[in-house]
Image: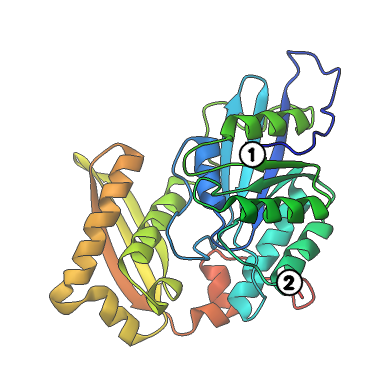
Amino acid sequence: MTVEESSAPLQGDGASTTRCGYVALLGAPNVGKSTLLNALVGEELSIVTAKAQTTWQRITGIRTSGNHQMIFLDTPGIVAPVGLLHRSLLFSVVEATKEADIIVVISDPLQSLIHRERERIKEVLDRASAVRIGVVNKVDVADLNASRVERQWLQDLGIPIVHLMSARRGTGLEELLRDLGENLPIGPFLYPEDEVASAPVRFFVAEMVREAIFKQFHEEIPYASICRVEEFRDAGNRTYIQVTIYVERESQKGILIGDQGQAIRSLGISARSRIEHFLDKPVYLDLWVKVLPGWRRKPEQLRRLGIPVPREDCVQ
């Protein structure tokens, strides 16, 4: 880990004064925001796959240690706002940066962002007034010169603190946490000290099913699928969970179910294992697939599925 420059931390608050604030994780798709969130919180809250743009809804993770409480906002990757779904995702990013006390801008030296992609990130960042900290991720597998290029780009954005680290391995994590803690505003904790997330359990269960879809299927299926928990109740010695997977076309439904139901059974086994580990109890997972034509293009459907839709003039 390298800190190129150091900003002066807030002084004079005393050892017993609590600090609490929102930390938004910002960057292009697939730079490792979700991996970093999971490492910072110490729990697997956010979807992590090899595919880009897997985070569709803002995920809030909480880390409380000593007199510091950090509320992390894992945001969707910043992409061109083409289509209603992508406009909605970008709107979510902008709103998170407005709320944040600290913005962590993450770059990936394994990616070669074009000028317009870098400018899009700068435009989002320029709308916010929060403290900025940079992270060059994946340095354990990246070329040293590429890491230096990304570090320079972050510095050119006016970011005074830049860490070279590996979220996957945890390299540099403690140093990043130190700088985050020093830049948190003074204030009371907003969540109980034992909480690690603000969303209900149902949200994370649906995300785990969606994660299994991303890992099992390819091409358009993961990006055309969204999951919602319809029922969640104790059933004897296990928890019964019914999840509906919405897709856009009948052909996608057929692929998800598979020949004689083989694909959906395999999906259920994979997702159930992850959910049982998360809940620490046996689960009966009941998966249903339904067609919701063109849900990614319809504001009323996106709102129904929990994705905020901006006004026409909110995201350009």
Considering the numbered disc 2 on the image, is that residue within a helix, a strand or a loop? helix
Residue 168 to residue 51: above or below: above
Q: Is residue 158 left or right of residue 312?
A: right
What residue is pinned by disc 1? 71
Considering the numbered disc 1 on the image, is that residue within a helix, a strand or a loop? strand
Give the quarter of the figure containing the N terminus: top right
Residue 81 image offset from top left, x and y in percent: 67, 76
Q: Which mark is residue 115?
A: 2
Camera-side residue of 107 and 281 = 107
Quadrant hosting residue 302: bottom right
Cα separation, mark 2 vs mark 1, equals 31 Å
Q: Which numbered mark, 2 or 1, is in the foreground of this view?
A: 2
Tag 1: amino acid:
Ile
Q: Residue at x 62, y 19 (%)?
A: 66
Q: Earlier in the sequence, mark 2 or mark 1?
A: 1
Q: Residue at x 34, y 56 (%)?
A: 231
Quadrant hosting residue 91: bottom right
Camera-side residue of 212 and 202 = 212
Q: Is residue 288 left or right of residue 9?
A: left
Residue 171 image offset from top left, x and y in percent: 53, 36
Camera-side residue of 126 and 244 = 126
Tag 2: amino acid:
His
Q: Is residue 52 left or right of residue 259?
A: right
Residue 13 to residue 224: above or below: above
Residue 97 to residue 266: above or below: above
Residue 38 image offset from top left, x and y in percent: 50, 42
Residue 241 image offset from top left, x and y in percent: 30, 53
- Residue 157, visible in the rendered structure: no
